[in-house]
Amino acid sequence: MFFRWLSHSLARWFLALAVFFASLVGTPVIADEGKENLVKAAFIFNFVKFVEWQGDKSISKQSKIDICVLGSSGIIRTSKVFSQASSAKLSLALVSEQSAGNAPSHCHVLFISASEEGRLSEILSSLKGHPVLTISDGDNFADKGVMVGFVNRDGKIKLEVNKSAAESAGLKIDSQLLEIALRVI
């Protein structure tokens, strides 16, 4: 019980840290794509802790988590964040994914680049019914069915959460993550 509390407390601390870093991202910093991608990577790392997968995909049953990137995005250059966040019990890997159809077999998280806007409905259809957390920084992607969308408001990275899309994939988003969202759909 103590370890579960400690794990949850650490997860809260990491989420608070990600929110803190996100709050520091102002107009001059947001122009630096590398720093913006690091902030997004910190958020994604914490999403793994604040989303509950069911059955065989449960994080507690995993030794490795693949965080996949579909399309052209600078987020792929943040792989060091995930390897450094790995532990002896859980390895986190950032993987460049070529096909959304392959994602359900190994991805817990799929970051869909804004460059995939023209194929978004096809991508989401291929993931339908599979417990893959979808994240994107594309404009209005959360409105189109992506579970978590990064948006830039007043020079800061904010979140939009499509709770119904997550629930239809069998994922449960922790209320603490919903509380920091700019908007919940």
Image (cartoon, grey):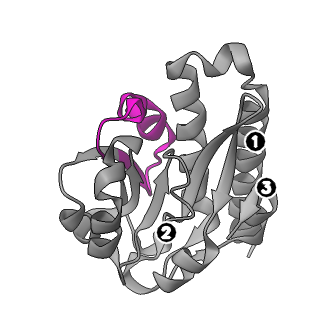
Left or right: 4 as drawn, with respect to 171:
right
Please tell me whether mark 2 or mark 3 is closer to you in this view.
2
- Pointer 3 and pointer 1: residues touching (CB < 8 Å)? yes
Mark closest to the chain's N terminus, 2 or 3: 2
| Residue 9 appears anywhere in the view | yes
Q: Which residue is mark 3?
A: 180
The amino acid sitting under disc 3 is Ile
Q: Which mark is residue 179?
A: none
* Badge nearest the viewer, 2 or 1: 2
Q: Residues within 10 Å of mark 3 (few under 14, many from 20)?
A: some
Residue at the image position 32 percent from the left and 48 percent from the top:
116
Q: Amino acid at mark 1?
A: Val
Is 129 positioned to the left or the right of 53 in the image? Answer: left
Q: Nearer the viewer, residue 136 or 106?
A: 136
Q: Which contiguous range is marked in magenta?
A: 69-93
> Can you identify the residue that label 2 sits on?
145
